[in-house]
Image (cartoon, grey):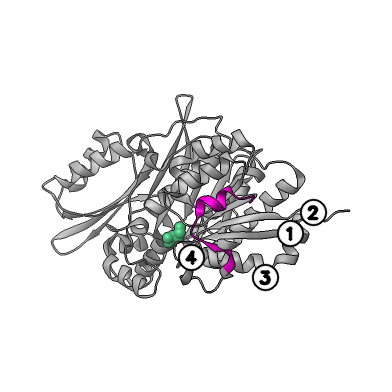
Amino acid sequence: MPAPAPIKVALLGCGTVGTEVVRLLTDQAPDLTARVGAPVELAGIAVRKPNKHREVPAELLTTDVDALLESDVDVVVEVIGGIEPVRTWLLKALNAGKSVVTANKALLAEHSAELFEAADRSGADLYFEAAVAGAIPLLRPLRESLAGDRITRVMGIVNGTTNFILSGMDATGAGYGEALEEATRLGYAEADPTADVDGFDAASKAAILASLAFHSRVTAAEVHREGIASVSAADIAAAKGLGRTVKLLAICERVTQGGAESVSVRVHPAMIPRTHPLAGVHGAFNAVFVEADAAGEMMFYGKGAGGAPTASAVLGDLVAVARNRVQGGRGPRESAYAALPARPMGQTPTRYHISLDVADKPGVLSQVAAVFAEHDVSIAAVRQEGRVDDAGLVIVTHAATDAALRSTVDKIGGLPVVREVVSVMRVEGEET
Ligand code: HSE
């Protein structure tokens, strides 16, 4: 039998993840050959400054991305990130029939339609397991293992930086600024933490998760996004007082109303019970909780970032794509047939926890309760703590639309008997 032709790989980018991809490809070459049925060969590595990459073979380095893409490579692995010029390069590769493995969440969350269309036209594969929750096998379970089920909800911690900050606030009682400083000092938060703390990173991941889970196309622009900068020590303390903790959640939910289905895709901080499996996810770890009609509840947990963990997911995709090439087929294609619309946040059912400082005198509770009734918001629980000349009032609602809940809070804040709205936080992970 003639030796099988090698699968030739172009690597675009050689930072923290790319370096680990090269290491794993080199160290595990004999195993990868056995698993794929052909050698997997690195044909070139595109970088901006070749003299800055002493850790990889110099003869593979190039600054000429177009020449590398036009060579006889079979697979392009992209670990650069950002939209352009990567979008142009990956479209060029897919149009030429080269399969693509990418970790680029921002690109997929904005431009997946044209990338999938290019892959379909040329018969190439497009795999992106590393784009969401790093090492955790999550996209393949959603796309393949659960393809026969009906997913109702995907709720996860998909950003390690913000989870590290919120875990720190919960553990020490520190405020947001202090916890962010600590995360920066320890290297968990970047010098410019905007993408993480303002929820952009998680929103891209939520768009990708929702698209796969609900066989629809959701873009990052359709994801309601709130970051963690406004989470205060008072919010965390209020949560603790009720046996809850605060997490930045990416939530993708099937909503059925009047017989019509839509998807609510959102990223925001929320209180969850300390007994919820996601409450036990601390530090920079990621975890995603999935609910499906037949399978029930599942949780996927692991490292969501870092060179080696992300490279593990990239290599898994590379092996899958290489196997498809050897066998002459393609992996599962995009499935957007359901085309469910994204639901605006104002119309999304959610629950609020509201903590107020109020005057402690007759009629206060009834005035506050009347505002809830006016907005058709049902109260699930009320707790009052009397102090010397005022009282702390904590109210947890049943599910109502976010618009109704916001209007309720606005009006309550204006009542003369309410001295301060101390904390407003959404509640997730428990019966509505
Ligand atoms: N910056 C992300 C995080 C990892 O903090 O989890 C890459 O998506």
What residue is shown at x 20% (from left), y 43% (from top)? 410
For the residues marked 2 and 3, what is the alpha-carbon distance in whole angstroms?
20 Å
The mark lying in front, picked from 2 and 3, is 2
Residue carrying label 4: 15
Q: Which residue is mark 1?
A: 39
Given the image, on which type of amino acid does mark 1 rest?
Answer: Pro
Identify which residue is drawn at 16% across, 55% down. Answer: 360
Query: In the image, which disc is placed on residue 4?
Result: 2
Q: Nearer the viewer, residue 222 or 5?
A: 5
What x and y, as percent, mark residue 333? 62, 38
Q: Which residue is mark 3?
A: 27
Identify the secondary structure beneath mark 2. loop
Kindly check if marks 2 and 1 are in contact, taking CB atoms under 8 A apart as contact.
yes
Residue 110: x and y, percent? 43, 42
Residue density around tag 2, few if under 14, some if 14–19, many if 20 or more, within 10 Å: few
Answer with left or right where residue 126 lies relative to residue 416: right
- Residue 72 visible in image: yes
Of the numbered discs 4 and 1, the one sitting upstream in the chain is 4
Q: CA distance from mark 4 to mark 2?
A: 31 Å
Query: Which numbered disc flags the more N-terminal residue, 3 or 1?
Result: 3
Q: Is residue 22 above or below residue 199?
A: below
The answer to if 86 sits in the magenta stretch is: no
Q: Which residues are magenta?
A: 59-73
- Secondary element at tag 1: loop
